[in-house]
Image (spheres, rainbow, N blue to C red):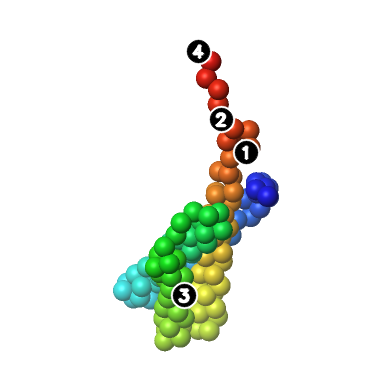
Amino acid sequence: MNQKPSAAFIGASWVALGAGMAGYLIGLWRSDLLLNEKGYYFTILMYGLFAVVSVQKSVRDRLEGIPVTDIYYSICWFSTVLAIVLLTVGLWNATMLPSEKGFYAFAFLLALFGAIAVQKNTRDSQVPNAADTAPKRSVV
């Protein structure tokens, strides 16, 4: 059952990704954090986004019978968990108000969810129809 995603779900996914990333990045831009702290949190966001897209792709590849090595699959999951742990440790030790810490945590998680959903929609939109996979006859 390869059903293409609805336009509403595609739009909601992009909004989640955009709102999570924009909120997180605007929060960083406007914060009083030192430049090295801003760099840390920015890097964690980029690392987390890449990690969840890799997890989504490798999980989907396995479900569709496309070979994915165990080491790559494990690295994808490890990277996703590590990005979340690094953000948690950074926020735990940060000298921010609890509301700021919560803002960054939820913006981060929203961006990760959005990235997974956008990747899924992209993959689902590229699934060929049965008519597209039928052998073509050449007319000579």
Tell us which disc is closer to us: 4 or 3.
Answer: 4
Q: Earlier in the sequence, mark 2 or mark 3?
A: 3
Query: Label 2 to label 3, Cα distance in Å?
Result: 43 Å
Query: Label 3 to label 1, Cα distance in Å?
Result: 35 Å
Residue matched to label 3: 81
Rendered image: mark on residue 129: 1
Tell us which disc is closer to us: 1 or 4.
Answer: 4
* Neighbours of disc 2 within 10 Å: few (<14), some (14-19), many (20+): few
| Element marked by disc 1 | loop
In the foreground, 101 or 71: 71
- 98 in relation to 20, above or below: below
Q: Earlier in the sequence, mark 3 or mark 1?
A: 3
Residue matched to label 4: 140
Q: Position of residue 38 (x, y in %)?
A: 37, 71
Residue 52 in view (yes/no): yes
| Element marked by disc 4 | loop
Q: Position of residue 120 (x, y in %)?
A: 57, 54
Tell us which disc is closer to us: 1 or 2.
Answer: 2
C-beta proximity under 8 Å, tags 4 and 3: no
C-beta proximity under 8 Å, tags 2 and 3: no
- 5 in relation to 30, above or below: above
In the foreground, 99 or 89: 89
Residue matched to label 2: 135
Rendered image: mark on residue 16: none
Q: Quadrant of residue 116?
A: bottom right
Q: Earlier in the sequence, mark 4 or mark 2?
A: 2
| Element marked by disc 3 | helix
* Neighbours of disc 1 within 10 Å: few (<14), some (14-19), many (20+): few
* Residue type at numbered disc 4: Val
In the foreground, 57 or 104: 57
